[in-house]
Image: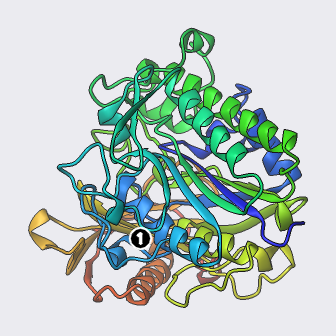
Amino acid sequence: MAQRPNVIVFFTDQQRWDTTGVHGNPMGLTPYFDWMATAGTHVAYAFTCQPVCGPARSCLQTGLYATQTGCWRNGIPLPLEAKTLAHYFRDAGYRTAYIGKWHLYRRDEIGPVPPEARFGYEYWLASNVLEFTSDAYETVVYDNDCRPVRLPGYRVDALTDAAIRYIDAHQSEPFYLFLSYLEPHHQNHLDDYPPPFGYRERYLGGWIPPDLAALGGSTHQHIAGYYGMVRRLDEALGRLLDALRSLKLLDDTIVLFTSDHGNHFKTRNSEYKRSCHESSIRVPTALYGGPFIGGGRISELVSLVDLPPTLLDAAGIPIPEAMMGRSLLPLLRGGKADWPQEVFVQISEAQIGRCVRTRRWKYSVRAPGPETCQDGGSSVYVEEFLYDLQADPYELTNLIHSEAHEPVRRVMRDRLLRRMREVGEPEPEILPAERRRSGQRRVSEEEALM
């Protein structure tokens, strides 16, 4: 491997984990992602720490939680003093580039992002809120001089073409490229998922995940277009990998594929995300290149904040102490003893909520009203749901009221409060949900720790 590997982040928007073949989707949407996951390293249980576009991006750029970055809802700009991945790579001698959707500048600016708000990215071809400056076949981004640039082709292809041009021009020097797509996010002004021409028809009447089949929402209206977008993204991933292969850079380039959050198709609330359900927080994640070739399947629970230290570690760059996550590289070497047993999720837009998820259990609380909001958090929460993911992986039976699950609630509540303290949140009051006799056996203390 080269002394300093290139690094590419292939970042999708609103992509469910179960769109991929390695997670059981039978539609054949992701052969290139599936190849990455099997030939490289598959992070089988990967979760966002904030299921909202801007806050999730702030976490991935900084390695901090959204309440720490200050970007706890969309439209809050990343603070000028923030240190991003681009700063660390640039300080280590890398060329840095950003292409696509940014969503970390002011709410009133949807297009250009000035140089002082690009946080270490020297090459710039992006839009602050890409869904508002472009459409499926009308891609408009802004260059280093804040001039609009119209790129030809379907939007996924237009950004991929730009990325391949950048890679070709910088193949002789180490580079860090963040490639941020809008797809498979909906097109806001249409409330539709516009795939490439002819792709929607391919997936009409296709497989529907069990939660969507049970709960409905906008699934039947939108799933075919959504699948078409996912398919084109995977084809773009294949093109990118082929470009690296043709330039003899593939094995010496670390490629991370991940997403900001998932999509529940209006089944859990009135829109597509902003809930702590698996459909909203679980994302497809895989790495290839360098130490990740032949890395196998990581079965530990991994958070979005674990990915920045992982990329720095793989590039030989020291991990800043301020980062909240930890590198995945020790997991590839069998170092699993001290890996956290849960992931922690914050929501601070549309609702104020907090959640912890272990291998088996998920426990979520919610602020009783907006008047309790304090910088993205609350002093009071109410228990919202408890799911047994072993028996109910698609979260169709809420156990929060079950007397039989009292030991689980107690353990999970303690875990949640500990994680909130660790990220600097004041310890809140959590009001218990009403208890009801369920007729089930009492869950044991041992089961509660799973």
Q: What element carries label 1?
A: helix
* Residue 410: image location, x then y, percent: 44, 82
Q: In this view, does 104 lie above or below 291?
A: above
Left or right: where 134 falls relative to 89? left
Q: In this view, does 249 lie above or below 93?
A: above
Q: Which residue is drawn at 58% across and 14% down?
A: 199
Residue name at image x 42 percent, y 45 percent: 126
Three-letter code for the amino acid on which mark 1 is drawn = Glu
Q: Name the residue under label 1.
A: 403
Residue at image coords 53%, 68%? 86
Position of residue 66 in the picture relative to residue 177 (left or right): left
Instruction: Give percent across and percent down for residue 280.
Output: 46, 49
Q: From the viewer's perspective, tell me whether residue 303 is left or right of residue 215.
A: right
The picture places residue 373, in percent across and down from the top left corner, at 16, 71
Q: Is residue 6 visible?
A: yes
Q: Estimate how packed mark 1 is, as few (under 14), some (14 to 19) or many (20 or more) residues with alpha carbons within 10 Å.
A: some
Left/right of residue 139 with respect to residue 4 in the rendered view: left
In the depicted view, which residue is nearer to us: 77 or 266? 77
Q: Where is residue 188 in the image (x, y as percent from the top left)?
A: 30, 31
The answer to whether any part of residue 359 appears in the image is no
Q: In this view, does 414 lie above or below 131?
A: below
